[in-house]
Image: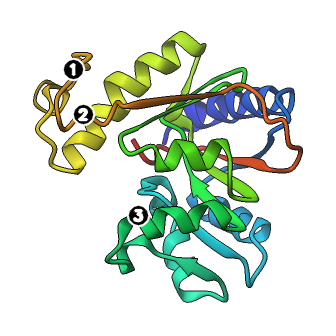
């Protein structure tokens, strides 16, 4: 990444962290993926029960490998034949790992879901939620965050899962009602009522979708 762009992104990340703080969400700055992994592992105590949805950002920084190989009770939903059971176990986890489809620079977090397991776990259930957010997810305001979530994140995820949606074919949102749509539930997190529950690591790199 260009040095000047990296510096600009660092400033933006700290602006976002101040916005998150005003919403009772603790933010951390990571200059790269390696630092993001170190911060994540410093937050999650060994022995914790940890799980996640299909969080590409966690994979991008190496967190999934670290949890699988470390001293954690990692509930990998891919190891469960009963996917519903795996999703329900997440609600009683010590830590739920996720990301954001987009976040405004003043700290409003936007997520879209198809099965609602991810957005429901962020909203309530797990004792702690840790969000891994690449600088590419940060937008100027809530309106642009919604547009990014629908026109960038959703088409990319639909393509990743091989879904037959208009956005997967055209690259933009058609506000569809396709049987394959992953835009079923929208979660806007503007404040965390419970102190110390939601934390976010802002990574100065393009990760996730």
Instruction: Please give the label number shown on residue 181.
Output: 2
- The quadrant in which residue 128 appears is bottom right
Q: Is residue 25 above or below residue 22?
A: below
User: For this view, does 15 lie left or right of residue 109?
Assistant: right
Q: Is residue 45 above or below residue 163?
A: below
Q: CA distance from mark 2 to mark 3?
A: 19 Å
One can see residue 66 in this view: no
Label 3 and label 1: CA atoms lie apart by: 26 Å
Q: Is label 3 or label 1 in front?
A: 3
Q: Who is closer to the viewer here, 137 or 111?
A: 111
Q: Residue 84, labelled with which disc?
A: 3
Q: Position of residue 6 (x, y in %)?
A: 59, 37
- Please indicate whether residue 79 sits to the left or right of residue 21 in the image: left
Above-or-below relation of 44 to 27? below
Residue drawn 45% across and 43% down?
116
Q: Secondary structure at mark 2?
A: loop
Instruction: Reply above or below: 195 against 23.
Output: below
For label 1, the residue is: 176
Dot placed on the residue nearer the N-terminal end, 1 or 2: 1
Q: Which mark is residue 92?
A: none
> Residue 149: percent from the left, percent from the top?
42, 27
Q: Are marks 2 and 3 in contact (CB under 8 Å)?
A: no
Residue 126 is situated, as x and y percent measured from the top left of the image, at 69, 58
Helix, strand, or loop for circle 3?
helix
Give me the residue at 26% from left, 33% from top: 155
Marks 1/2 in contact by CB < 8 Å: the verdict is yes
Mark 3 and mark 1 in contact? Answer it, CB < 8 Å: no
Q: Secondary structure at mark 1?
A: loop
- Label 2 Cα crowd, 10 Å radius (few <14 / some 14-19 / many 20+): many
Closer to the chain start, of discs 2 and 3, is 3
């Amino acid at each position: 990444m260009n040095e000047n762009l990296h510096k600009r992104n660092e400033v933006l990340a700290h602006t976002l962290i101040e916005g998150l703080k005003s919403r009772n969400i603790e933010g951390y700055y990571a200059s790269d993926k390696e630092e993001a992994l170190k911060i994540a592992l410093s937050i999650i105590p060994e022995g914790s029960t940890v799980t996640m949805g299909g969080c590409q950002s966690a994979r991008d920084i190496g967190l999934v490998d670290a949890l699988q190989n470390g001293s954690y009770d990692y509930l990998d939903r891919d190891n469960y034949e009963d996917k519903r059971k795996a999703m329900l176990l997440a609600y009683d986890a010590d830590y739920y790992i996720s990301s954001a489809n987009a976040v405004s620079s003043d700290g409003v977090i936007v997520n879209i879901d198809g099965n609602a397991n991810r957005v429901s776990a962020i909203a309530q259930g797990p004792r702690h939620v840790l969000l891994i957010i690449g600088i590419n997810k940060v937008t100027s305001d809530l309106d642009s965050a919604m547009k990014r979530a629908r026109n960038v994140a959703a088409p990319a995820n639909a393509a990743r899962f091989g879904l037959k949606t208009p956005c997967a074919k055209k690259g933009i949102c058609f506000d569809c009602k396709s049987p394959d749509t992953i835009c079923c539930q929208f979660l806007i997190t503007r404040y965390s009522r419970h102190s110390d529950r939601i934390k976010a690591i802002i990574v100065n790199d393009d990760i996730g979708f």
